[in-house]
Amino acid sequence: MTHPRPARRRAARRLRAALVVALAVTLGATAACSGPLDPTAGTAADARTASIVRDVTFHAPDDVPLTLDAYLPRRTEALVPAVVLVHGGAFVGGAKDTAGMVTIARRLQDHGIAAFTVTYRLAPEHTYPAAVDDVAAAVAWLRDPAQQAAYGVDPERVGVLGTSAGATLALTLGTRPATETGVRAVVALSAATLLTADGLTLGATSPEEVRATLAYLGCADVEQCPVGEPASPALTVTPASSPALLVNGTAEAIPLPHAERMTQALAAAGVAHDLVTVEGDAHGAHLLDETVWARVLTFLDERLAAPAPGAAG
């Protein structure tokens, strides 16, 4: 008697492992961004007083538990803004506690913004839109009144920041109506924004990048992939989309035209946006030099600012 389902699962696991290895360099899964969470950070048992709370389950689609780590500023009476951080890994790998994610989370924490590094379902076992829906679930969880009480976050001041594949997921969520998602701001570091056949020929798109994208889309052929268009942030922007800040290298793994096409779409829809380009081949979290980091913080401070007393809404 044969058992096709376990066989398919084993094949999917082998494919994912192969893609992770092949894309380790080109899509930013480098050693500099893949270290474990600093053990000196400690664990937290009480979200009201601790600065870090690890491995909190926020969602369990298809009985797959998804967890997050919370990096909380010192607790005060005032509610603080929050940012959901979405890791890279070519849609098939990566983790919430890589060195790059931890560094970003701690810098936001030091700035007075609560940061939540999240996990999501990975391809090829889980294809579009599973990962985007998982990030949406993290935002919804964060905006629940229970999290306002537990973590001191303002449910009306939530943003999303993603790197590499995570940037694509963040932007895809950001194109949905902000009134429904609750996303006030999106920061995208090295996002692929056109996942169609035409988009994957922009610039020097590598074969590894194309294979990873197809795994995420659940397609065998880039020319015949009906979900390529709805999965492309640059093709799904509306006037109701969230404001976005895009950062891209001029010679990196994700060709600059992806960011340029996205900013054109945002401009056409009348959505607030900005594009920061960095000379060279830096990718994802490696784009965050001091100048770029200052731009990111300014964008988040403006978009996640508390309303003035007496202001409508």
Image (cartoon, rainbow, N blue to C red):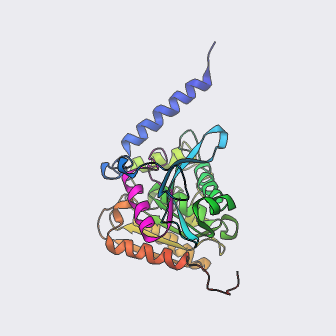
- Regarding residue 120, the answer to whether it shows in the image is no
Question: Most extreme residue toward the bottom, as rendered?
Answer: 310
Residue 5, image x, y percentages: 61, 26
- Image quarter where the C terminus lies is bottom right
Q: Which residue is rendered at x = 69% and y = 70% of the image? A: 179
Q: How many marks?
A: 0
Q: Please report the bounds of the magenta region as a residue range.
A: 87-116
Q: Nearer the viewer, residue 313 or 164?
A: 313
Q: Is residue 90 magenta?
A: yes
Residue 167, image x, y percentages: 49, 60
Note whether 172 is above or below 209 in the view shown: below
Residue 142, image x, y percentages: 62, 59
Q: Which residue is rendered at x = 31% and y = 48% of the image? A: 31
Q: Nearer the viewer, residue 217 or 133?
A: 133
Using the rendered view, name the quadrant where residue 305 is placed.
bottom right
Note whether 36 is above or below 292 in the view shown: above
Question: Most extreme residue toward the left, as rendered?
Answer: 280
Residue 143, image x, y percentages: 65, 62
**Drawn side of residue 98 relative to residue 241, left or right:** left
Q: Nearer the viewer, residue 87 or 219?
A: 87
- Image quarter where the N terminus lies is top right
Note whether 140 is above or below 36 in the view shown: below
- Regarding residue 83, the answer to whether it shows in the image is yes
